[in-house]
Image (tube, helix red, strand yellow):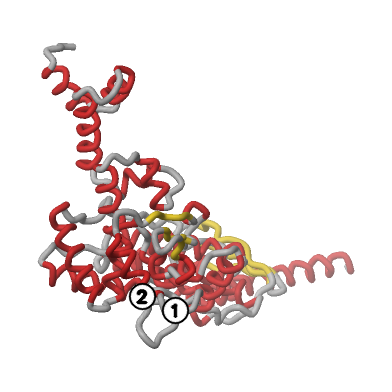
């Protein structure tokens, strides 16, 4: 009898559990649906969250808080958002914003040795691109795609490519710091093809602009003198604006560049065949302290921004009656003129502070300048100013179309 009663009791308990299960499951589903509708309202702290796992047409999270429970969501993105939020709340990090992690990322880069100008550039690429006040965990893959798509309609291809590249690096840093578990920008693909190189002035236009810059420099415009030094030496804007009095050596004929990007950027440059510019530089630094910046406004000790130099050049181009170019294109102008004058690509790369001549040829030297230089060397060789070995070596550097012209001119058919 006792055994029978025990069986009945067990059966009754089992029946009650089975009767409660649908109600418990219904309650859990309502809670999960509410979280799906508004993931930002999830406030429960959890010590462990697993998933999301595919569960029929929905996605399931397993939460231990401290007991095991399941949460169902209509889509994968919402499940990931809730999971990351639960994990963050368990660690007390739910209030972390995009602006917060950007500053942490920049501090990390600073500790790794990045210079301040580069760090400032990274900040300018990240914060206009990302919503600084938004919470880190609010950025889903769908929102990430929307953010990038909006950028493609506002800025140049090269700009939104760079913004996306730095943003992916930022979120990788956040994963490493265990702020999030997945990169919402991981699957965002860059669109469009960036233009290579920048608009360069023709030789006559460059002479016209140079004459105007020298005239403005004689009037005391330090920005015109800085731009003149930039085109003569092929310096980066940050490099020319960072020059100090002690960087002028050998009576102003040598400029020592500390560099702003890497070890290759540290170099000494000869300011040859430019006595007017040398004289203007010498006059400008005459009353300056050894560590004083050469190119800065009167009464200011801080460096001029590259934006200021960019605007100044746009103004000078308009007044000189030449096409508007940016300061960085002056490096390309310097490269093209140097190659046309006979300098090799490797020498130009050293002057520009590049580690190899591939970047120089791809982005700075106009293709026509390389062709002209080859043609000039061939003409020199054919006129008898080189030996046979030199002539053969020069002919081998010609592109196929020009080699055909040479062969046709001497009556040779291949």
Left or right: where 103 falls relative to 379 = right
Location of residue 7 in the rendering, given as x and y in whole percent from the top left corner? 81, 65
In front of the other: 69 or 93: 93
In front of the other: 88 or 5: 88
Do residues under tags 1 and 2 come within 8 Å of each other at their CB atoms?
yes
Which residue is at 63% across, 74% downward?
Answer: 20
Name the residue at the bottom extreme: 299
Q: Residues within 10 Å of mark 2 (few under 14, many from 20)?
A: some
Q: Is residue 139 visible?
A: no
Query: Is 16 located above or below residue 113 in the figure?
Result: below
Location of residue 408 in the rendering, given as x and y in whole percent from the top left corner? 12, 17
The quadrant of the rendering that contains the N terminus is bottom right
Q: Is residue 118 visible?
A: yes
Query: Is 289 located above or below residue 359 in the figure?
Result: below
In front of the other: 261 or 410: 410
The quadrant of the rendering that contains the C terminus is top left
Left or right: where 221 falls relative to 321 = right
In front of the other: 108 or 305: 305
Which residue is at 21% across, 56% downward?
Answer: 199
Query: Is 42 located above or below residue 335 in the figure?
Result: below
Q: Quadrant of residue 46?
A: bottom right
On residue 401, which mark appears? none
User: What residue is shown with label 2?
Assistant: 284
Which residue is at 47% across, 59% downward?
Answer: 261
Helix, strand or loop at mark 2: helix
Location of residue 89 in the rendering, given as x and y in whole percent from the top left corner? 61, 78
Left or right: where 209 falls relative to 232 = left
User: What residue is shown with label 1?
Assistant: 288
């Amino acid at each position: 009898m006792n055994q029978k009663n025990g069986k009945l009791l067990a059966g009754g308990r089992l029946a009650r559990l089975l009767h409660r299960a649908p109600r418990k499951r219904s309650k859990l589903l309502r809670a999960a649906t509410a979280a799906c509708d508004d993931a930002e309202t999830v406030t429960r702290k959890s010590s462990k969250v697993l998933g999301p796992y595919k569960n029929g047409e929905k996605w399931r999270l397993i939460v231990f808080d401290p007991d095991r429970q399941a949460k169902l969501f209509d889509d994968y993105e919402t499940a990931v958002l809730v999971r990351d939020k639960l994990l963050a709340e368990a660690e007390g990090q739910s209030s972390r914003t995009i602006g917060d992690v950007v500053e942490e990322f920049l501090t990390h880069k600073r500790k790794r040795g990045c210079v301040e100008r580069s760090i400032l550039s990274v900040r300018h690429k990240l914060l206009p691109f990302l919503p600084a006040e938004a919470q880190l965990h609010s950025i889903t893959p769908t929102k990430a795609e929307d953010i990038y798509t909006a950028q493609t309609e506002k800025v140049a291809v090269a700009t939104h490519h760079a913004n996306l590249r730095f943003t992916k690096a930022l979120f990788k840093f956040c994963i490493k710091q265990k702020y999030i578990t997945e990169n919402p920008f991981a699957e965002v693909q860059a669109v469009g093809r960036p233009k290579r190189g920048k608009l360069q002035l023709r030789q006559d236009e460059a002479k016209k602009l140079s004459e105007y810059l020298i005239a403005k420099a004689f009037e005391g415009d330090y920005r015109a003198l800085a731009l003149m030094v930039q085109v003569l030496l092929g310096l980066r804007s940050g490099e020319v604006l960072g020059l100090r009095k002690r960087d002028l050596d050998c009576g102003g004929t040598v400029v020592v560049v500390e560099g702003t990007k890497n070890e290759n950027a540290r170099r000494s440059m000869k300011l040859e065949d430019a006595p007017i510019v040398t004289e203007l530089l010498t006059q400008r630094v005459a009353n300056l302290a050894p560590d004083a910046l050469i190119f800065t406004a009167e009464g200011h000790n801080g460096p001029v921004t590259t934006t200021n130099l960019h605007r100044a050049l746009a103004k000078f181009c308009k007044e000189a009656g030449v096409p508007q170019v940016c300061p960085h294109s002056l490096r390309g102008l310097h490269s093209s003129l140097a190659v046309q004058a006979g300098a090799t690509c490797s020498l130009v790369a050293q002057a520009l502070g590049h580690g190899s001549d591939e970047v120089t040829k791809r982005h700075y030297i106009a293709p026509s300048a390389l062709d002209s230089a080859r043609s000039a060397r061939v003409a020199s060789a054919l006129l008898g100013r080189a030996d046979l070995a030199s002539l053969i070596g020069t002919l081998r550097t010609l592109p196929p179309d020009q080699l055909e012209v040479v062969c046709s001119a001497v009556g040779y058919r291949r």
